Image (cartoon, helix red, strand yellow):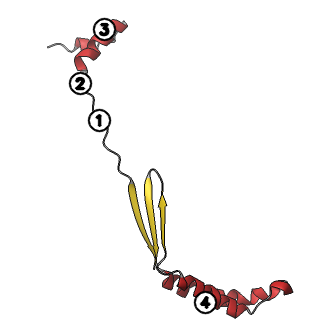
Amino acid sequence: MSLQHVTERPRDLKAVRLRAGRVRRARSAKPAPQRRTQVDLWLPMTPLATILAPFMMLLAPLMLLAPRMWRMNPYETAFAVIRLLLSLGGTEIDVDTPDARVRIKIL
C-alpha cells in the first residue's frame, strides 16, 4: 500500500473531496452533554467574627473623628457589627446562572 495519496499535496478540490469522502464517519459524533457545575460553599461566621473583633476594637476610636451628627459609642457600634455577623447564621444564598449553580450557606 502506497502512502503517496496521503502525503501528496492535493492540487484540486475534487481530489480533496474524494479523500474526505473516504475518511468521513458514518454518523457524526455527538458532543458530550454539558452538565451545570454546582458549587456549594460554607461560610462560618463565628471564626470570621473572632478574627475581626480585635481589629474592630483597635479601629473603634477612629469613629470619634466622625461628624457629631453620626457620632456614636464606638465600642457599642463594634459589638453591634459583630452581633449582626453572628445573626446571619442559617442564611442560604442561591445563585443560578446558565453555566453554574452556586449555593452559599452561612453557618
Foreground disc of the pair 2, 4: 2
Q: Earlier in the sequence, mark 2 or mark 4?
A: 2
Q: Quadrant of residue 103?
A: bottom left
Binning the other alpha carbons within 10 Å of mark 2 as few (below 14), some (14 to 19) or many (20 upward) gives few
- Farthest residue, direction left: 1
Q: Amino acid at mark 3?
A: Ala
Q: Does 103 appear above or below 63?
A: above
Q: Which amino acid type is shown beneath numbered disc 4? A: Pro
**Nearest the camera: 78 or 8?**
78
Residue 11 seen from this side: no
Q: Quadrant of residue 62?
A: bottom right
In the rendered image, the quadrant that contains the C terminus is bottom left
Sooner in the amino-acid sequence: mark 2 or mark 1: 2
User: Who comes first in sequence, dot 3 or dot 1?
Assistant: 3
Q: At 21% from the left edge and 24% from the top edge, which residue is drawn?
A: 26
Secondary structure of the residue carrying tag 1 is loop
Q: Identify the residue at the far right of this view.
A: 68
Q: Which residue is mark 1?
A: 30
Task: Tell me where residue 68 appears, x and y as whole percent.
Answer: 85, 87
Residue at 38% across, 53% down: 36
Say which mark, if any, is on residue 54: 4
User: What residue is pinned by disc 3?
Assistant: 15
The kind of secondary structure element at disc 2 is loop
- Mark 1, mark 4: which one is toward the viewer? 1
Quick one: quadrant of the N terminus?
Answer: top left
* Contact (Cβ within 8 Å) of mark 2 with mark 1: no
Mark 3–mark 2 distance (CA, rounded to whole Å): 18 Å
Residue depicted at x 24% and y 26%: 27
